[in-house]
Amino acid sequence: MRYRVLGPVHMTPRTPSAAKPRAVLATLLVRRDTVVSTHTLIDELWGAEPPRTATTTLQVYVSQLRKALLEGTDGAGADTGTAQPLLTRPPGYLMRVGPEELDLAVFESLRAEGRAAYGRGEYEAASRALGRALGLWTGPALSGIAHGPSLETSAIRLNELRAEVLEQRISADLRLGLHQELVGELMALAHEHPLRETLHCHLMVALYRSGRQSDALQVYQQARRSLVEELGVEPGPVLSRLQERILASDPSLARYGGPERRLVGVGGSGHPPADTQPDTQPDTQRDAAPGGPAGGSGGGGRAAGPTVWLPPAVADFTGREDQLAVGERLLADTAAGRNRVLVVSGRAGAGKTALAVRLAHGAADRFPDGRILVTLRDAGGRAVEPRTAMATLLRRLRGPRATDVADDVDTTALPSSEAELAELLHRRTEGRRTLVVLDDAVSEAQVRPVLSALPDSTVVLTSRQMLGALESVRRLSLDVLSAAEAEALLAACGGQRMRDDAEAAAEIARLCGRLPLALRVAAAGLAARPHWTAAELARRLRDERTRLAALALGDLDVRSTLLTAYHDVDEETRHAFRMLAPAPLPDFAPWAATALLGTDPARAERLTERLVQAHLLEARRRPGRLAPVRYGFHALLRSLALDVLAEESPQQGPAAVARLCRAYLAAARYADAQLAPGRDRLTHDAEPVAGISPEEMVGRAPLRWFQEESAGLAEAVRQAHAAGLWSLCCALASAASGYYEAGALWDEWESTHDLALDAARTAGDVHAQAVILRSLGDLAWQRHRTGQAVDRYRLAGDLFTRHGDRAAAGRCLSAEADALLARGQLARAGRGYARALSVSRLVDDVRGAAESLRGLALVAQREGRHEEALARLGACEGAARRAGDHRWTEYARRTALALRLALGSGQSAAAASLPLEVRPGVWLFPSTRPPRQAA
């Protein structure tokens, strides 16, 4: 298409940038192939007070438009006008537009096609055509320009047409049984258009058919309040009648049933209701099998067919092929009499109900006597009593008014006793092949009486809990979707914008933790906001602190759903959930949980396992790791944990962070001491985890501990900084620097030490600043940024001198000389090492003397003074031995041995150009290129 008016006015190849030429274009387009008078255009542009030059100025605008229109052609026919769509036709101008060139023309064609299909009862074709028509819109009609009288009238008309098409497309989708899929979109539309009664009718029907009668009635009350407050009128007869039918549980409103019942009935006349009416007419041609939600045959005697009381299977159900295959095999086993209960467990929002319903729909042949779903929570999310569940099941088996003569069960007068209800239910299902879905169970105690009353039925039980105490059951656990499944679900639910931006869709899937509910809400949010892109949605989800708030649309609220799982557990377990919120990502060892909870290891394990059973925490097997089982949060559950921690335990959060950081510090200092005894590090009161010593946390694998806990250690530095634990932040970074250096983890080194330097400066801790700056100097030196290294070493030395630590200042001189040596400035490096040696001997710093002697030996070797180099290395070995530093002792010994071997093999000339191990494990390789200078 070359022209667009269903949104911002646009044309290709180029849209005029000035507003008034665009207004001329828009006026001509909405009245395409019709002459628009000059007077009408002037009135549109300037209203009642046009300028004296209005006619001339309008001609200029028309000329500009004609030039822009010809940019899309090769210019042929410009003189004759055959290629120019904008023509002069007295008393004004005419715009010639082909039927496929203008989005409005295509919209009108698709609208007519959709209305005709709807009138014929071809609802799938109607939905498809009307959906395509709506897909042409990119915003309010004729937006981006000022409206005069003509454009204002056109904009109102077009926006109303859009609303009409939207309502009819929703009506078609309702007739196709897509009520659950429509709830999110309708919630947003009803909020956006609070006075459109048709939208509220559609929403009430969708909610009612989704088993949410109380929510449907609440929508009526909201709509009534809006109408009374805004207009002073009561709801119209259609909306009022719909409320009465919902209150009466009118069975003709229901759309439950299996695939055999997806044919949607028509009105009493045999024709669909008028386009202006919502799709709420009763279905006189029953689409329910006998024994369906209307309650069987309506009279005495056994039902003529199977009882089916299931919500429709989710139309865009995506993935889960492996789990469906497992579930189908397990149902086949239970139908054969083996372990008749299948427990489907998983965290809130994992899609347990959708999977169970899909399994039930696919199992019609195995359960010819009926398939029924009963929800085990009320509208407020509270657990229903077992007797309530059994009474509901009995009513759905026979209906609210029917009497089964053969079983003598009159469901109009059900007993209140749980035992009597169980007996009736047992008799009603005895010897029958029936599948019962008990959805969203809260506990074993809630379902045991119901299961006992159904000894001959197969039961699919869904729950957020493991329900591990149930005996003789099969189990199927649902995790999040795979990355490919998550992206496919987003594409199925989010429309073309999601499919067009695969990169944004992949990021949205990751930020939603690939949780089906979150993915559906994200996709529905995008579908309900045509002015958003997938990339914009991804941007809104990036901030962990606001992610849950962004995953809400109407009553589709991921946070509320996750909160129900949180409130299902006892207060002790909820407290543990909150206290574990600061745990590092992606997972953490049991000792970290012990530290955060501030308890002993046994109680910490008990609480974490409770959270795992409730699917509020994940236990992840890590074979071969120091901790073979580690714990981790799903991304959205961690966001929830941080929220409830801030809301319910704001004073306890910082204390938990401090305990975790001190535990990390105790373990990191111990591991660092094993790797490099005697290495200078900042001190802080480290607090071992209660009942676990640093030796137990690290074991005999200090390097492995650092490798496994590197991410957590960096997170601990960040959390200490965020909590204002300045000294702890500095000590943690300092304890990790040796591992960062050995592992060449430059980014982690820099990020943690930048935070530590800021912490030290904030706290006014001169000594900590000096230590961190020296470490940052080492980092710059490792990265060959020698100029930056020299600057940092000098600043660190000045701070050490200010602090009164002359030994540390002397070691900074040695480090600075190392940077000069790397630059090839041997003379300056030698003078630096000599100064450092003098300071070390003056303050009796044996370790510093060892470092300085090592540097002097390296300079001597580079300058060909090999005997002097060997003597210096011998002195270095002796100083390191006196300092008790085995690492430096071995370094001096092997460096001297390598030099002797080179000299002994007659390579004395080459010895000066050999690679130098300038520090233990750190090598300097000679280069034929000029020395690299820092920027």
Image (cartoon, helix red, strand yellow):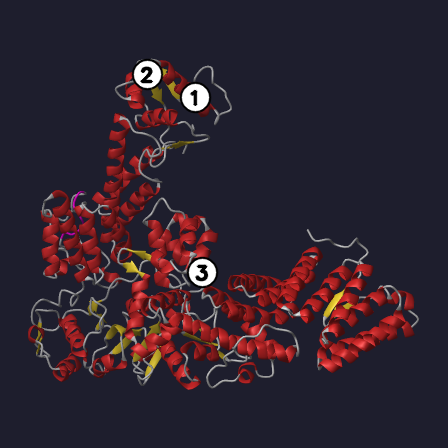
Q: Which residue is mark 2?
A: 51
The mark that comes first in sequence, 3 or 1, is 1
x and y percentages locating residue 771 in the rendered image = 62, 67
Above or below, comparing residue 53 to residue 684 in the picture: above
Q: Is residue 282 left or right of residue 591?
A: left
86 or 708, nearer to the observer: 708
- Within 10 Å of disc 3 (Cα), the crowding (few <14, some 14-19, many 20+) is some
Between the C-alphas of marks 3 and 1, the distance is: 48 Å
Given the image, on which type of amino acid does mark 2 rest? Pro
Q: Which residue is mark 3?
A: 510
Work out which residue is located at the far right of the displayed protein and give it: 906
- Within 10 Å of disc 2 (Cα), the crowding (few <14, some 14-19, many 20+) is few
Above or below, comparing residue 93 to residue 468 in the picture: above
- What secondary structure is the magenta-colored segment mainly? loop
Q: Is residue 671 left or right of residue 240?
A: right
Of labels 1 and 2, the one closer to you: 2
x and y percentages locating residue 830 in the rendered image = 81, 64
Check disc 1 and report its element: helix, strand or loop: helix
Given the image, on which type of amino acid does mark 1 rest? Gln
User: Which quarter of the picture shows residue 465?
Assistant: bottom left
User: Which quarter of the picture shows residue 920?
Assistant: bottom right
Quadrant of the drawing holding the N terminus: top left
Disc number placed over residue 576 in the picture, else none: none
- Within 10 Å of disc 1 (Cα), the crowding (few <14, some 14-19, many 20+) is few
- The residue that appears at 31% across and 28% down in the rendered structure is 30
Please say if the residues under marks 2 and 3 sit with CB atoms less than 8 Å apart: no
Please say if the residues under marks 1 and 2 sit with CB atoms less than 8 Å apart: no
Magenta stretch? 276-281
Between the C-alphas of marks 2 and 3, the distance is: 58 Å
66 or 565, nearer to the observer: 565
x and y percentages locating residue 760 in the rendered image = 54, 64
